[in-house]
Image: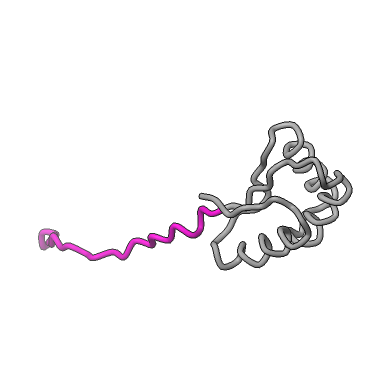
Amino acid sequence: MKPAIYTDFEEDVDVLENEDITKKIVIYNDDVNSFDFVIHCLMKYCKHTMEQAEQCALFIHSKGRYSVKEGDYDTLKPIKEALTEKGIDAKIEE
């Protein structure tokens, strides 16, 4: 029986460093938009269910701001722009 041969080697591994994955859309509370309007926009632009949208609207109202969607910048940008065009105070944050 031959002895096992072990060989040490180094392997270069590429690490995905994509900070864009950690971006999120944050909506801030205001005194202008109604709950129903915010819920409607969350369902339409963020593709939330009614329940998700209602919970987000309650968090926005009670906490003053809430992260409603996560993803990469290129995906979030058109959603954020649609929300702000409707008068919702939304920002993309890390």
What range of the chain is rendered magenta? 1-23
In this view of the protein, which residue sits in the foreground, 63 or 88? 88
Q: Is residue 27 above or below residue 71?
A: above
Which image quarter: residue 34?
A: top right
State the scheme by which the image is colored: one colour
Q: Quick check: is 62 in the magenta stretch? A: no
**Quick check: 70 left or right of 49?**
left
User: Percent x, y for residue 32?
Assistant: 82, 45
**Quick check: 53 left or right of 9?**
right
Screen quadrant of the N terminus: bottom left
Which image quarter: residue 6?
A: bottom left
In this view of the protein, which residue sits in the foreground, 66 or 29? 29
Give the residue drawn at x 85%, y 44%.
Answer: 35
User: Percent x, y for residue 69?
Assistant: 65, 53
User: Percent x, y for residue 18?
Assistant: 43, 61
User: Percent x, y for residue 73?
Assistant: 54, 63
- Magenta: main secondary structure equals loop
Give the residue drawn at x 80%, y 48%.
Answer: 53
Q: Is residue 20 above or below residue 33?
A: below
**Quick check: 73 left or right of 38?**
left
